[in-house]
């Protein structure tokens, strides 16, 4: 009984927190045409779904800072994940790993539309390029990120959000 009451309280708190957020929708152009949306040592379909869900969840989290009556629509037009995929050769088989270096920076292309409660466009843009040339590879930053595989891409989205919506509340 205690666990169901606790679960209900947590669910209520989560819903209450999201209730003050703008409505956010995330769309995806053809993932097969993306520059680098490549799985490393897992099924491509599983990687794509997990990565899309991770990006979507992060954009929704950012949208919580916008007024609840507004709506934010974000479309991912292209994704080039940080690093590059290279083979590693072991004693009996080969595998792949994503190598991070200063020349393989992340690059995202998004389009967005931000509207108010009446559907009037507050701001919008098509094919906004988000990139950071030679992002900081400070191991402390990566370790502090809980080893998030999209750490550098999320930094790009966060910077875009701050620049685009400077009045968003924290």
Image (cartoon, rainbow, N blue to C red):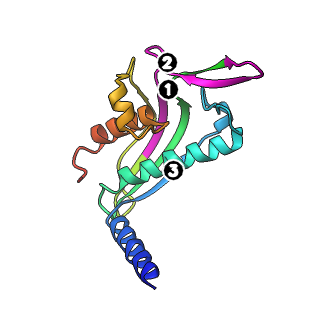
In what element is the residue under mark 1? loop
State the residue at coordinates (48%, 31%): 108
Which sits in the foreground, 28 or 50? Answer: 50
- The magenta region covers 88-112
Q: Residues within 10 Å of mark 3 (few under 14, many from 20)?
A: some
Residue placed furthest toward the front: 91
Relative to 49, 58 lies left or right: left
Query: Where is residue 126 shown, x and y percent of the image?
Result: 46, 37
Q: CA distance from mark 2 to mark 1?
A: 6 Å
Query: Where is residue 16 shown, x and y percent of the image?
Result: 34, 71
Which of pointers 3 and 1 lies earlier in the amino acid sequence? 3
Relative to 97, 54 lies left or right: left
Which of pointers 2 and 1 lies earlier in the amino acid sequence? 1
* Residue 23 position by quadrant: bottom left
Q: Which residue is mark 2?
A: 104
Q: CA distance from mark 3 to mark 1?
A: 21 Å
Q: Nearer the viewer, mark 3 or mark 1?
A: 1
Q: Which residue is mark 1?
A: 82
Q: Which residue is mark 3?
A: 26
State the residue at coordinates (24%, 53%): 170
Q: CA distance from mark 2 to mark 3?
A: 26 Å
State the residue at coordinates (51%, 50%): 26
In what element is the residue under mark 2? loop
Which sits in the foreground, 1 or 108? Answer: 1
Asked whether the residues under the numbered discs 2 and 1 touch, taking CB atoms below 8 Å apart as contact, a structural biologist would say: yes
């Amino acid at each position: 009984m205690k666990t169901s009451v606790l679960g209900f309280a947590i669910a209520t708190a989560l819903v209450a927190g999201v209730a003050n957020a703008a409505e956010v929708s995330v769309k995806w152009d053809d993932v097969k045409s993306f520059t680098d949306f490549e799985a490393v040592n897992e099924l491509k379909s599983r990687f794509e779904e997990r990565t899309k869900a991770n990006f979507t969840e992060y954009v929704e989290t950012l949208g919580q800072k916008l007024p609840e009556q507004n709506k934010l629509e974000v479309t991912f037009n292209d994704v080039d994940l940080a690093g590059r995929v290279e083979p590693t050769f072991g004693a009996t088989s080969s595998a792949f790993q994503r190598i991070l270096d200063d020349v393989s920076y992340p690059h995202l292309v998004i389009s967005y539309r931000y509207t108010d409660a009446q559907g009037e466009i507050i701001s919008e843009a098509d094919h906004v390029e988000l990139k950071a040339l030679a992002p900081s590879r400070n191991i402390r930053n990566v370790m502090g990120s809980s080893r998030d595989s999209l750490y550098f891409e999320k930094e790009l989205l966060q910077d875009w959000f701050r620049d685009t919506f400077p009045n968003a509340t924290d």
